Image: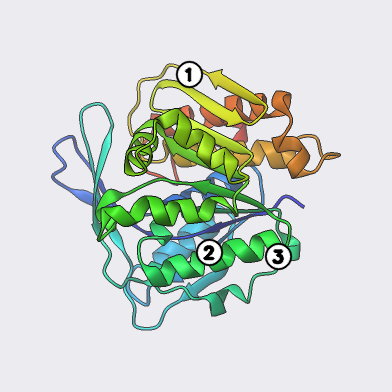
Amino acid sequence: MTKLLSLGELLIDMLPQDSQNSAYLPIAGGAPANVAVGYAKLGGKAAFCGGMGDDYFAKQLSKSLEQYKVSTEYLFTIKDSQTAVVIVSLDETGERSFNFYRHNTADLLLTSEHLNHIKWDELSTLHFCSNTLTNLAIANTTVCALKLAKNNHKLVSFDVNLRYSLWQNSNDIEHNVHACYAYCDIVKLSRDELNFLSEQTQQAPDDYLQSILDTGVKLVFLTDGPAPATVYHKAFILNESAPIINAVDTTSAGDAFIAGVLYYLNHTDENSSLIEKINNEHLVKHALSFGLRCGSKACLAKGAFPALPTLQEV
């Protein structure tokens, strides 16, 4: 059993069509959806769980997931709701900035009742991000999903993936993020996110990393753009450099990375449990390397879903 369920937002990325950001093309996106597609393109079984708008974009979004063989059985249409939209702008190095249009949109309206449909016995892993922690209602739904996953003995992966503009009060960020750690086996965050979260708790970054492990998290993956990535475990610390590339678009780099890590852990050494695997230093080192290759490959093309690599490309 190696099926991934990715929980969160499915939205429209308005991607620039030239270096001046003067024209945009609507493309399906959203970090958890990217991870589901990334996992499926590598050859894994994946499903997406989230609220979908009752609007013009709905058919495009569901078809986009189905095109990449991501199951939409847990994609729920929210009556009379709109799809969230994000304007993505790129600078000359391929780095992104985001402007979100997300007021009471479908991705925020998923409820615990929707979660009752999930067939946990078909799944190995639940993955989520922090964009479904930004207000009380969707945060409660997310925590409910985490509790269900742990009660059903599933691996839980959390990509912090902060989008600061989505939070009404930035003082809520660390509290809401930290409340999830107790349910997680894997946490991924960037160097910038680590610095922000440690500052909010008035801790040194290394102390904050240790505080995550102290909650019971087994692996913390720390990425830092083109700089080497690090994975922290209570028994070991591993570093690895990313392949050197000329980035075209970094939109889905982090999503490709964690999709690669989760794919590798789920599809290697079938005689071991996932919990055994995430405590195996040798296997984790290979998962880190595989994830970095996936993330680098995703920077070589524009867009999210199309840029995510297949297994043959990695």
Query: What element does badge 3 sit on?
Result: helix
How busy is the neighbourhood of tag 1: few (under 14 within 10 Å), some, or many (20 plus)?
Answer: some
Relative horizontal placement of residue 204, taking residue 126 as reference (left or right): left
Q: Which residue is mark 3?
A: 120
How busy is the neighbourhood of tag 2: few (under 14 within 10 Å), some, or many (20 plus)?
Answer: some
At a point 24% along the width and 53% down the height, the residue shown is 165
Dot 3 or dot 2, earlier in sequence:
3
Amino acid marked by disc 1:
Pro
Query: What element does badge 2 sit on?
Result: helix
Q: Report how far apart the C-alphas of labels 1 and 3 lie in the structure.
A: 36 Å
Relative horizontal placement of residue 267, taking residue 218 as reference (left or right): right
Is 37 above or below relative to 111? above
Amino acid marked by disc 2:
Val
Q: Position of residue 83 (x, y in %)?
A: 33, 68
Is 120 above or below relative to 193? below
Q: Report how far apart the C-alphas of labels 3 and 2 lie in the structure.
A: 16 Å
Q: Report how far apart the C-alphas of labels 2 and 1 lie in the structure.
A: 36 Å
Amino acid marked by disc 3:
Trp
At a point 40% along the width and 64% down the height, the residue shown is 60
Query: What element does badge 1 sit on?
Result: loop
At a point 60% along the width and 36% down the height, the residue shown is 219
Relative horizontal placement of residue 133, taking residue 273 as reference (left or right): left
Relative horizontal placement of residue 279, taking residue 243 as reference (left or right): right
Q: Which residue is mark 2?
A: 143
Q: Position of residue 314 (x, y in %)?
A: 57, 28
Q: Position of residue 250 (x, y in %)?
A: 36, 34
Residue nearer the viewer, 183 or 114: 183
Q: Which residue is mark 1?
A: 243
Q: Nearer the viewer, mark 2 or mark 1?
A: 2
Residue 188: in sight, yes or no?
yes
Q: Position of residue 149 (x, y in %)?
A: 65, 61
